[in-house]
Image (cartoon, rainbow, N blue to C red):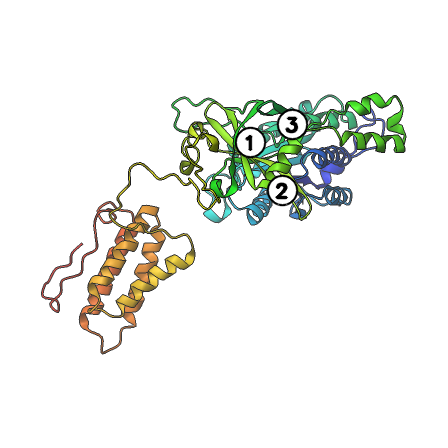
């Protein structure tokens, strides 16, 4: 889950902290930098596979560091942060939206950490002005919240609650969270403004958002203490009338192994890094003072590498054998463990969570009914591994009356439109084929709610009608105009013209032996 740090670089962040509250001469900006340094150090040690970006803002926003795993770069950019002018949070949130969508699209869950002193800005562009003018905005000037992607917003205020409640700042920040769907939290400093209190505030953020998930990974008689990063989120099932959050168990039981080719690329809810927790008894037994001696520390670490660990064994085995381990996360809830290369020389043990249910991957059947090869009458993979029992064939063979139109790529849609235009230029000889292709595209567009496509094709047909040569058959112009008109009516969504089970029929003209248009 990537993180965007949105740092306030306005002049109000340069306000000095009272010497009564802090023994050193510090600005609020210095406190913010100290807190973020603490966060970056924690993420470098525990979330090193996650991507983090740094954005600074005042009246404008600037991407200081694009998404990276290099926390030294983030720390350097933070140390060199300059001071700018007034606060304009709305433009900064637009910037975050652009940065995330360009890198990750609309589907990737993201954490947004906003670090500010609580100053909302003055006049036009301030948060107060933005919230007061939410209604009645044109489409191109809408407020950036909620984000067009799943996001949690955490607001880190370099101020205490008493200071924020003296004005309407806290109310406006709470309204900001509500606009984002309520996902997130506001953190304030407790007591005096000093390094200790800002570290305490960022410590609460780390504990609630960036803390690992401790668990025990088991397989038969083997077990290993592990940590899962990031912490798995509770899951709510849509089909339940009164949904309750489902959490994964701290006891993760491996129920079997399967080849990567059989499980393919399954749909997953989230992906997590699994790291072993090594308890090094040898280091504890070396004696006092050894951690201060470099030679002794190196020797102790070498001894730690010799301690057997099931998690390390599992990772190496999955990598060499090209297999995945199916792991039970809870009642009728499964996931998979596998080796994923992070670079040419480095790989990690990863865990992906499937949708809860007894049959998360239909081509494998029910997970509870899978068993070892030794239980089968004959090897389902064949003596030379030349076949596979997967995917399972459904017991009932479904019958499809016609092919379903699916546009995965733009080229597929373009091909269907070009086919209609080619037949349109050969009217009236290709009348039946023209309407057959036209109705196929119309049904698909109605099924997807793709009203713009119907209007666009209608305009193309009208253009074709104007480009007809003088030698064209008169019926061609009538058919093109009729088809364009019916598509435009269907694009309005009116049930009278946009019924899925209706077809556009050829127009009966004096040239074709009739006199009325049909639908």
Q: Which mark is residue 177?
A: 1
User: Badges 3 and 1: C-beta atoms under 8 Å apart?
Assistant: no
Q: Position of residue 369 (x, y in %)?
A: 42, 28
Q: Earlier in the sequence, mark 3 or mark 1?
A: 1
The alpha-carbon separation of the residues under discs 3 and 2 comes to 43 Å
Viewer can see residue 498: yes
Label 2 CA crowd tier, 10 Å (few <14, some 14–19, many 20+):
many
Residue 123 or 510: which is nearer the viewer? 510
User: Badges 3 and 2: C-beta atoms under 8 Å apart?
Assistant: no
The quadrant in which residue 153 appears is top right
Q: Position of residue 435 (x, y in %)?
A: 23, 60
The quadrant of the rendering that contains the C terminus is: bottom left
Residue 96 or 304: which is nearer the viewer? 304
- Foreground label between 3 and 2: 3
User: Residue sitting at 78 percent across and 22 percent down?
Assistant: 281
The alpha-carbon separation of the residues under discs 3 and 1 comes to 34 Å
Q: Which mark is residue 226?
A: 3
User: Residue sitting at 38 percent across and 60 percent down?
Assistant: 414
Q: Which residue is mark 2?
A: 88
Q: Seen in the image, is 228 located left or right of residue 424? A: right
Q: Earlier in the sequence, mark 3 or mark 2?
A: 2
Q: Secondary structure at mark 1?
A: helix
**In the figure, 203 relative to 112: above or below?**
above
Q: Seen in the image, is 102 located left or right of residue 376? A: right
Q: Secondary structure at mark 3?
A: strand
């Amino acid at each position: 889950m990537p993180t965007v740090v949105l740092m306030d670089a306005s002049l109000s962040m340069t306000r000095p902290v009272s010497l009564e509250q802090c023994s050193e001469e510090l600005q609020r900006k210095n406190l913010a930098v100290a807190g973020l340094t603490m966060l970056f150090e924690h993420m470098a040690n525990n979330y090193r596979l996650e991507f983090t970006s740094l954005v600074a803002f005042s009246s404008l926003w600037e991407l200081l560091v694009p998404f990276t795993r290099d926390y030294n770069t983030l720390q350097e950019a933070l140390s060199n942060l300059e001071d700018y002018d007034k606060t304009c949070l709305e433009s900064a949130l637009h910037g975050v939206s652009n940065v995330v969508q360009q890198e990750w699209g609309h589907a990737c869950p993201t954490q947004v950490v906003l670090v500010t002193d609580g100053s909302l800005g003055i006049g036009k562009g301030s948060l107060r002005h933005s919230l007061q003018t939410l209604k009645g905005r044109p489409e191109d000037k809408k407020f950036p919240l909620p984000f067009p992607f799943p996001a949690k917003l955490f607001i880190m205020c370099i101020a205490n609650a008493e200071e924020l409640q003296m004005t309407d700042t806290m109310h406006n920040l709470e309204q900001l969270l509500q606009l984002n769907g309520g996902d997130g939290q506001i953190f304030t400093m407790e007591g005096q403004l000093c390094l200790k209190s800002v570290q305490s505030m960022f410590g609460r953020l780390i504990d609630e958002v960036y803390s690992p998930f401790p668990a025990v990974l088991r397989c038969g008689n083997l077990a290993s203490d592990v940590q899962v990063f990031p912490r798995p989120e509770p899951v709510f099932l849509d089909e339940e009338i009164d949904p309750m959050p489902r959490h994964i168990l701290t006891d993760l039981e491996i129920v079997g192994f399967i080849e990567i080719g059989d499980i393919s690329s399954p749909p997953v809810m989230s992906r997590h890094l699994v790291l072993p927790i090594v308890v090094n008894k040898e280091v504890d037994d070396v004696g006092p003072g050894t951690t201060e001696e470099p030679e002794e520390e190196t020797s102790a670490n070498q001894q730690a590498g010799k301690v057997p660990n099931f998690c390390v064994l599992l990772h190496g085995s999955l990598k060499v054998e090209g297999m995945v381990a199916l792991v039970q996360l809870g009642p009728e809830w499964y996931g998979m463990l596998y080796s994923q290369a992070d670079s040419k020389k480095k790989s990690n043990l990863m865990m992906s969570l499937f949708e809860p249910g007894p049959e998360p991957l239909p081509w494998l059947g029910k997970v509870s009914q899978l068993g070892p090869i030794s239980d089968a009458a004959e090897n389902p993979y064949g003596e030379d591994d030349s076949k596979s029992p997967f995917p399972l064939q459904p017991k009932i063979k479904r019958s499809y009356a016609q092919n379903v139109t699916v546009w995965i790529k733009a080229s597929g849609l373009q091909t269907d439109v070009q086919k209609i235009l080619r037949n349109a230029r050969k009217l009236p000889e290709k009348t039946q084929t023209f309407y057959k292709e036209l109705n196929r595209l119309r049904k698909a567009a109605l099924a997807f709610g793709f009203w713009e496509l119907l209007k666009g094709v209608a305009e193309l047909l009208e253009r074709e009608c104007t480009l007809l040569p003088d030698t064209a058959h008169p019926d061609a112009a009538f058919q093109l105009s009729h088809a364009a008109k019916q598509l435009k009516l269907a694009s309005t969504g009116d049930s009278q013209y946009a019924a899925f089970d209706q077809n556009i029929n050829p127009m009966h003209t004096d040239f074709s032996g009739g006199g009325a248009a049909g639908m």
